[in-house]
Amino acid sequence: MMMKTKILVILSVIFAAVALTLESGVYLGHISAIKKRAKELKEYKEEEEREKWEELVSPLSGSYSGKIRLTKVNSPFQVNDNVFFLDGEVEIEAGVIFYIANQADVWFEGRNVESALRIEGTESLPVKFTSSRSNDPESGDWNRVVIVNCEADVNYAIFEYAINGLRVSSDVNIKNSTFRYNLSNGLIVGESGSSVTHSVEITHCNISNNEKKGLLVVGPRSTAVIKLNVISSNGTAGLETKDYDDVTIKQNNIFDNEEYDLVNSSSRDLDAPDNWWGTTDTAVIDNNIEDDDEVTTYGSVDFDPISDSTFTKAGLE
């Protein structure tokens, strides 16, 4: 009797183990199917998301809205008339080139909905806004790029041979970008008389060889951080602060600009400490700065303390 009982117990354990094994197999099968289905859904959503973006081809003209992508495959893009990217998202891939003619504008603007711009160049493949006369370009061949009411990240971009390279009146982060050979100004932050509040950060940029000002801060509601840039060989001024809410200018190499390295034409006093001015001679530095010493209606500039050497990390990273 005891032997039969033991046998029955052993058989029960075996049957239970077999049942559990079968059950586990079914469970594992369900898990595998769920994972497979999740992967398929992810791929479907990614494809669906890609289909929502419109990829443009050259030439560009008129207005575009929605989710816009400009790719290196479809580059270069010819711009003969004003182009407006309105109310949406715009992505510009590394290596894209815009050839712009007839003093045209390229606008990125949010009018009715939140808008965003991402210029995603690289060191070896920058995004370039340049003259359509690629073999014989001249300063002033086209007008400007404008970013207004549109949050933007600009990384490794070149703005050259325009009247004004770039004007921004938005929350914008500009880094590793080059502003050169423009007829008037390389980069303008804000707009005179504007009531729009915005914050702009400009870091690791090269701003040089612009016929008037390299960088102009002009918006009364503008907040700007200007750090680790090389600002040199510009015409009337390397940097001018005309009107602003708050400006930080530090750890830049600002030197060898034709008339002045820095102009503070605002009535407000300006602090610009810890910059390299191409010399440690404070009398020379002061002579290369236009402030209330030269024009009584201008605010003063306090450039102390000065850096005693160039910032090696300034300019493109």
Image (cartoon, rainbow, N blue to C red):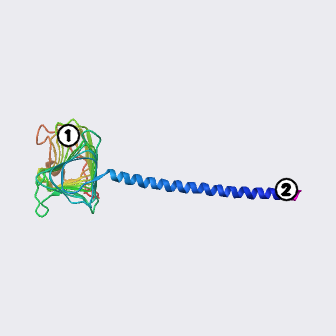
Specify the quadrant of the image occupied by residue 125: bottom left
Q: Disc 1 residue type?
A: Gly
Segment tinted magenta in the rendering: 1-5
Residue at image position (37%, 52%) is: 48
Q: Mark 1 = which residue?
A: 219
Three-letter code for the amino acid on which mark 2 is drawn? Thr
Q: Quadrant of the C terminus?
A: bottom left
Q: Is residue 58 above or below residue 200?
A: below
Q: What is the crowding at mark 2: few (fewer than 14 residues within 10 Å), some, or many (at least 20)?
A: few
Res 124 label: none
Q: Secondary structure at mark 2?
A: helix
Q: Nearer the viewer, residue 298 or 240?
A: 240
Residue furthest right in the image: 1
Is 218 situated left or right of 27 in this image?
Answer: left
What separation in Å lies between label 1 and label 2 (alpha carbons)? 94 Å
Q: Element under label 1?
A: loop
Image quadrant of residue 179? bottom left
Q: Earlier in the sequence, mark 1 or mark 2?
A: 2
Q: Nearer the viewer, residue 269 or 224?
A: 224
Which residue is at 49% across, 54% downward?
37
Taking the image as drawn, is residue 185 in sight?
no
* Magenta stretch: dominant secondary structure: helix
Residue 304 vs residue 192, the one in the foreground: 192
Marking on residue 5:
2
Residue 159 shows in the view: yes
**Position in image of residue 144 (x %, y %):** 16, 50
**Residue at image location 79% in from the left, 58% down from the top:** 10
**10 Å neighbourhood of mark 1: few (<14), some, or many (≥20)?**
many
Q: How many marks?
A: 2
Measured along the vertical axis of the image, is residue 148 above or below residue 124?
A: above
Picture coordinates of residue 20, whole percent (x, y): 68, 55
